[in-house]
């Protein structure tokens, strides 16, 4: 019997060690990294020659839950960057009670010109689900809600309050729509889509490409599904701004994202890349976002972020 005890000792110690490492990783991912907000700075050469640089602040995937004071304070502080304009690429909510806190967090940014689209979590509250399903759905070629109606019993988020407040501040709603911002003597045109993740996108309603009487035309969408990227690129937009992926949310160091929760490849789950379609090439920026689903409040090797993009003339 004494020998049997010694035989079980090493495996038990290994199991305990693995459990301890896993617990420590979860504490780090939920307690530290998910609250370690960062600003990513990028330069994108997409402006016509001779045009002055433009500073664009992109915020995405806030997923506000009531009581997230640190996130609210950090978002408020971004107004100190003094961007030329703000692009909000959706999923502001993760709590039906979160609208007042989103508006409080974004309040200082609403003083700047801005445009926005909504994501699925603006319309519907998240449901508790096994996070491993994202891996299974990737293997089966499915992506969350894409192609399906919202689940029976889905919670309606009061997105109308966000829309009304954004509109009242002068931000332009780009849900399957075109819009413009005027910055001093510059005319900026935007084309946007409602969220492809739940098949609310209607590209036919906005097709036709950049507006040639504008100084610059940009494309905006929440979820970077290939069909949307192909359409924008084929029409000739120089830059597409998107969110949704959370950068993979849980990334493997030296490997990258495992999933994107849409059909874009994991190599482009966050940051600046390019997209090609119909013989044309667009710059693509996918924000890793600054929040998480309220039921999976962890991030690993993928800190929450906003992005300050400096648009410069191309060579």
Image (cartoon, rainbow, N blue to C red):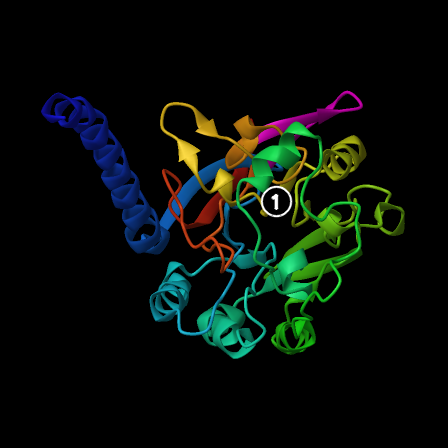
Q: Is residue 216 left or right of residue 50?
A: right
Where 298 falls versus 284 (above or below)?
below
Residue 150: where, in percent of width, then height? 75, 58
Where 6 falls versus 190 (above or below)?
above
**Which residue is painted at 72% across and 67% down in the image?**
153
Q: Quadrant of the N terminus?
A: top left
Residue 13: where, in percent of width, then height? 18, 31
Residue 211: where, in percent of width, then height? 79, 47
Q: Is residue 281 magenta?
A: yes
**Which residue is painted at 21% across and 34% down in the image?**
17
Nearest the viewer among 225 and 185 is 225
From this viewpoint, which residue is outermost toward the front? 1
**Which residue is painted at 13% across and 24% down in the image?**
6
The answer to whether one can see residue 50 in this image is no
Q: Is residue 39 magenta?
A: no
Q: Quadrant of the C terminus?
A: top right
The number of numbered discs placed on residues in the rendered structure image is 1
Residue 58: where, in percent of width, then height? 52, 52
**Which residue is painted at 40% across and 43% down in the image?**
41
Q: Secondary structure at mark 1?
A: strand
Find the magenta span and give its range: 273-284
Characterize the magenta stretch by its predominant secondary structure: strand
Which residue matches tag 1? 241
The answer to whether one can see residue 64 in this image is yes
Nearest the viewer among 196 and 152 is 152
From this viewpoint, which residue is outermost toward the left? 2
């Amino acid at each position: 019997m004494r020998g049997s005890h010694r035989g079980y000792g090493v495996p038990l110690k290994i199991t305990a060690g693995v459990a301890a490492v896993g617990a420590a990783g979860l504490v780090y991912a939920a307690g530290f990294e998910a609250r370690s907000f960062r600003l990513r700075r990028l330069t994108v050469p997409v402006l016509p020659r001779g045009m002055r640089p433009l500073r664009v602040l992109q915020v995405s995937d806030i997923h506000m839950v009531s009581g997230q004071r640190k996130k609210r304070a950090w978002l408020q502080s971004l107004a100190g960057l003094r961007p030329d304009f703000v692009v909000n690429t959706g999923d502001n909510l993760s709590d039906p009670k979160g609208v007042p806190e989103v508006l409080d967090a974004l309040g200082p940014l609403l003083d700047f010109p801005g445009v926005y689209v909504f994501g699925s979590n603006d319309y519907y509250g998240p449901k508790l689900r096994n996070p491993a399903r994202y891996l299974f759905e990737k293997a089966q070629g499915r992506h969350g809600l894409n192609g399906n109606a919202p689940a029976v019993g889905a919670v309606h988020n009061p997105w109308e309050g966000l829309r009304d407040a954004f509109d009242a501040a002068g931000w332009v709603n780009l849900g399957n729509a075109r819009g413009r911002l005027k910055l001093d003597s510059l005319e900026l045109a935007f084309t946007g889509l409602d969220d492809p993740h739940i098949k609310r996108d209607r590209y036919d309603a906005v097709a036709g490409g950049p507006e040639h009487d504008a100084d610059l035309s940009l494309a905006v969408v929440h979820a970077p599904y290939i069909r949307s990227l192909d359409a924008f690129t084929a029409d000739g937009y120089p830059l597409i701004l998107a969110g949704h992926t959370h950068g993979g949310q849980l990334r493997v160091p030296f490997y990258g994202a495992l999933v994107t929760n849409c059909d874009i490849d994991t190599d482009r789950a966050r940051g600046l890349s390019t997209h090609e379609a119909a013989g044309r090439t667009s710059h693509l920026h996918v924000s890793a976002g600054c929040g998480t689903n309220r039921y999976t409040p962890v991030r690993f090797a993928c800190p929450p972020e906003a992005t300050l993009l400096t648009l410069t003339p191309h060579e």
